[in-house]
Amino acid sequence: MKDINRRDFLKIAGAATASATLAACANKTGNDLGDLDLNGHHTGAIPTDKMTYRTNPNTGDKVSLLGYGMMRLPNKPVSPTQDPSVPQTEEIDQEQVNKLVKFALDHGVNYFDTSPAYCQGHSEESTGIALQASGYDRSKYYIATKLSNFAPQQQTYEESVKMFRNSLINLQTDYIDYLLLHAVGGGGLPNLNQRFIDNGVLDYLMEQREKGLIRNLGFSFHGDQEVFDYLLANHDKYHWDFVQIQMNYVDWKLANETNSRNVDGEYLYGELEKRGIPAVIMEPLLGGRLSKMPDHIVATLKQQRPEDSVASWAFRYVGTKPNVLTALSGMTYMEHLEDNLRTYSPLVPLNEEEQEWLENEIANLYVSYPTIPCNDCKYCMPCPYGIDIPAIFVHYNKCVNKGNVPENQQAANYREARRVFLIGYDRAVPKLRQASHCISCGKCVSHCPQNIRIPGELHRIDDFVEKLKQNIL
Amino acid sequence: MLKLTRRILALFFWLGITLLFLDVTGTIQPYLEWMAKLQFLPSVMAVNLISIAIVLVLTLVLGRIYCSIICPLGVLQDFFAWIGKWKVFRKNKKTKFANKYSYSKPKKWLRLTVLAVFIIMLLAGFNAGAILLAPYSAYGRMVASLLQPLYIGINNLLAQWSEANDNYLFYQVEPHNNPLILCVIAILTALVLLVLAFMHGRTYCNTICPVGTVLGYIANYSNLKMRVNENKCIKCGMCEKNCKASCIKVEKGQPVKFDYTRCVVCGDCQAVCGKQALHLAPAEKTTKSEQASEGEQAKESDLSRRSFIAITGTAVATATIKAQEKTTDGGLAVIEDKQVPTRQTPLTPPGSLSASNLQQHCTACQLCIANCPNGVLRPSTDMAHFLQPTMGYENGYCRPECTRCADVCPTGAIKPITKEEKTAIQIGHAVWIKENCLPISQEQRCGSCAAHCPAEAIQMVPLDKSIKQNLEDGQWYDAEGNQLDWQAMRALLMIPVVDNEKCIGCGKCEYLCPARPFSAIYVEGHEQHREI
């Protein structure tokens, strides 16, 4: 079990000193942008007309740099009148979604990204309702959705076509602005062929593009580089209008280093830029992990721009790359939305020094913390054995960041950390859904876009919990 | 002064023992468990000579102060008797004191008969009957089944507050799932005892309670006794009218008589005496009448000595989910509740040595059950082990670091053990239920039981019997004689096999088995625990 031991601490402290030096230069350039800040950029009402837009070279769409990810929609407890046999205890808080979408549209956001699989399959419907309720004309916003045929029984031509048509119905629209092959890369080329090529589904989608039912066709990518390369190599054949990739300042150079099954953002972005294919960015914030940083990092970032959020650095980082069409953010709360709107209304680009500082110093410092790279996307869920996988990882990461994952009993805060970890664990995850119940069936592994070896990590956490409980760490 | 001292000490013991039952976090238990171990019947059951000696010496010096200070049921009765004396409940509201009691004749034969029946029931192993009469365990059942749920409820409210404020002062605790019969018995006991106490003071203590009877006849020989200075006494009868034990007899022209087998040295008489004629004093040269009154009881004390020996003798004698294909993201699968399997032999906790040891010693006070943090212990509803602890693994298992039931048990039904000893005590063995096992019922690879077994008593072997292990190299070969590497092995369906010699019966496999509602592996109890 890794904790911040002395050596790590020295490393971290060293990095912090180095970053402080660099920050001194960064500060100077930061001052040049100070004028902008004085124009109410950080305080007061959020401007409604300052959103930064990027132009899609294929269609001329003016897309807001902030895209709304409809994967982390707010929930509320299920009303008691519903069927009690349904396991669901929460449902989407539609009223809140309507409010968030309207607010986003009012402040210049015009890209909404959903999928038939999100939010237990309810995201598209909820998105459709919220967009209709906003009162904006269909031409004023862009809808992105996906062909999420993950289960083997959905991978036939008929089922896939049905899925696409359902999307149109759920989203209450006649056409999709941006349609993606959902999460290609996992399972390599065989999986790609099985899902989209051999069954003729990709041909069908290209036909729909011809007909105008799909205005832009692309794919979202996670995992095996071979698949990415293959799809781009066949760009002449498929004419990708855009590609959605995972990119942020940690994954820019370290995605592959932290997990050999993942590809660095630098490579993915570079390949797209070379071919002039606009990039849609997912996980600019790593599921919120780049806003919930360890104290050392928060202090360093905050020192540079005390009024700006920690998250704003991550958004400015991806926004600075010119070939980025939009950066998606799954905004559950109004506070997230407001903060991101401020960051991009308008975007204050990072200078080169700042970019390198984030990619190198901060990213290295960040990966030196032994957090699990889970972005709480819930693709792994539901676990057939009832385990709440993301909740376990989120709790573990929270404890890592707060220094509550002691290495051994000699750790200075051992007693306190033990209490916080164990009580917090029972609070975050009911006993029956904790890691000890994992039987390693492995059903989750192929669903994880971050390629986390979920059963292995669960067992590691369970071992740690057992040692804490037995006081034998 | 005597009354005040008694009240302070009584409150101290009563709070201590009650908290010992209530606290589910195990925080104060190490500081308070001695209070339970001082209880008389439990220490007799445990042949806890130190505790027995302390109580006997106390009684021989000071009389039955055990009953008014150490016994939580006695203190609770005093509390209700005190409420019964409030002016609102009295007819004569003008007097300063309640004056509601009067002398009653000793019910010697009733007391001795109850005591004899009690001893016979214990000797015959009919604890179900005996425990209903025992004072400390009756109190324990009341607290565990009536008060602890309330305590846990409050704790859980505080835990909610704690969680909302992001601190770690309180945490949620699962309430114990007590059977209805326990609550019914506790409520009945409470009703009878507390109403009696409210109306008549210490009726139960001086007629039914076997401990009261034994200590009463010993108290007859105590050095210090409540005595009357006949020179000061005006025979007003205030002491008699306010004696909740109804043991003082005041007659004009006669010396005041005490039945010392019933006096619990509460000091109430001393407090109401306007002439300061009552004192706790050693025996002086006795007057003729006192001789007479004590001589009357000397006969009884012979009996009591015999019965005491009988009790001690008794004690010495007895001391021997089908996986679904996911199409959307998020959500939680339903988890069906586990059901209790039918066990041939019930499980008893480590330290209890054997089913019969537990059965003979346990007075069903519920202290171990109230203290079990893992949801494992629960009262048995089976008549032979009525309300004594038994185990089940649906909500948790007997965790290796926990010895709490053994720590708190005052009767020696569960003997103290260390964590190290616990890892080697076999209380049962795991039994595999083929039909429920995932590799067979769903062709799903599992191995949860083997992966978690703390005793390493479970191994996974190929379901396909044609795949055999070569005993020389320990490797597995298929029917054609090809050696299977780890990858090939990982693709096989494997089933668990249990080494009964290594299994300690902790129930981790049963608890973590994914088969629901009945686990594919469960623990069968052993009559006799063994060290392995």
Image: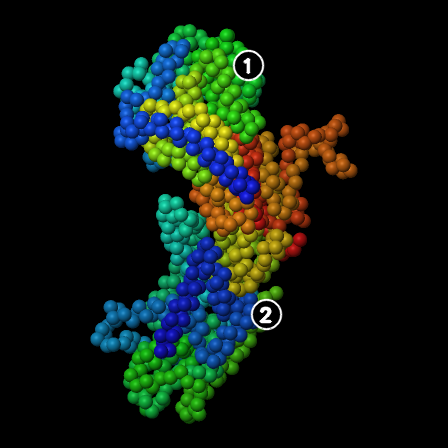
The disc placed on residue B238 is none
Q: How far across and how far down the image is residue A440, in percent? A: 57, 34
Q: Judge the density around disc 2: few (<14), some (14-19), many (≥20) Cα neighbours within 10 Å.
A: some
Q: How far across and how far down the image is residue A297, in percent? A: 45, 36
Residue drawn at x 74%, y 28% is B482
- The chain ID associated with circle 1 is A
Q: Judge the density around disc 1: few (<14), some (14-19), many (≥20) Cα neighbours within 10 Å.
A: few
Figure colour scheme: rainbow
The answer to whether tags 1 and 2 share a subunit is no
- The chain ID associated with circle 2 is B
Name the kind of residue labelled 2 in the image: Val
Against B166, is B107 above or below? below
Please name the residue that numbered disc 2 is placed on.
B316
Please give the count of numbered marks on the rendered protein.
Answer: 2
Please name the residue that numbered disc 1 is placed on.
A230
Front-most of A247 and B241?
A247
The kind of secondary structure element at disc 1 is helix
A28 sits left or right of B440 in the view:
left
Against A344, is A8 above or below? below
Q: How far across and how far down the image is residue B137, in percent? A: 46, 63
